[in-house]
Image: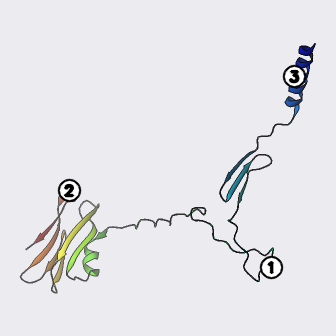
Amino acid sequence: MLRLCSAGLLALLSLAVCTLPASSAVQVRLPFITIQVGKPAPVAVAQAPVQPQPAGTPLGVPVPVELPPGLVPVLPPPTPAPAVVHPIPHGVFASTFKPAPGTYAVVFLHPGSKCAVPVTFTLPPGCPKVEVRAREVVFDYGKREVEIRFKICGKVAVNYR
């Protein structure tokens, strides 16, 4: 008889448990943060450490509190867009360029292949005469010369004489 009562009581208990609404609430507690997930919507609560109320401040007035580092996400600074470099025809370059001593890196529009070609050249100190020809730019320093020559098949040569 005891077994029959136990079996009936167990069946009634399991029926009562199955008819209860299911709740899948989860609560995670960390220092200064409580996260509750469940019905009706997820809730996250951040709590600052308790600090003493400054003298002369009425109770209930919010007091600014500094949170420990790491609680506030820090976004990386946005990366700037890369600069777009347009190739320049050698005639336009020669008419606008002011020669000064130093090393220069220029992207030219090759007069033959019409492709962009990078050219690096170094100018010595002095005041050169700039000559533009069909396939070359010449910086004439008198005894010295820097020549940028555009060859066939999109090749470029820089000669120092």
From the viewer's perspective, is 81 left or right of 104? right
Tell me the kind of residue under disc 1. Answer: Pro
Residue 153, numbered circle: 2
Instruction: Point out the image quarter for the N terminus.
Output: top right
| Residue pointed to by mark 3 | 10
Q: Residue at x 88, y 21 (%)?
A: 11
From the viewer's perspective, is 96 left or right of 29? left
Q: On screen, 137 above or below 6?
A: below
Q: CA distance from mark 1 to mark 3?
A: 58 Å
Tell me the kind of residue under disc 3. Answer: Leu
Q: CA distance from mark 1 to mark 2?
A: 83 Å
Q: On screen, 116 above or below 36?
A: below
Query: Foreground residue, 73 or 96?
Result: 73
Q: On screen, 144 above or below 29?
A: below
Instruction: Point out the image quarter for the C terminus.
Output: bottom left
Q: Element under label 1?
A: loop
Foreground tag (2 vs 3): 3
Q: CA distance from mark 2 to mark 3?
A: 91 Å
Q: Residue at x 81, y 73 (%)?
A: 60
Q: Residue at x 63, y 71 (%)?
A: 66
**Quarter holding residue 151:** bottom left
**Labels 2 and 3 touching (C-beta < 8 A):** no
| Residue pointed to by mark 1 | 58
Report the residue that reaches farthest toward the left: 143
**Quarter holding residue 69:** bottom right
Counting from the top left corner in percent of width and height, residue 12 is at 91, 24
Q: Residue at x 77, y 80 (%)?
A: 57
Counting from the top left corner in percent of width and height, residue 25 is at 76, 44
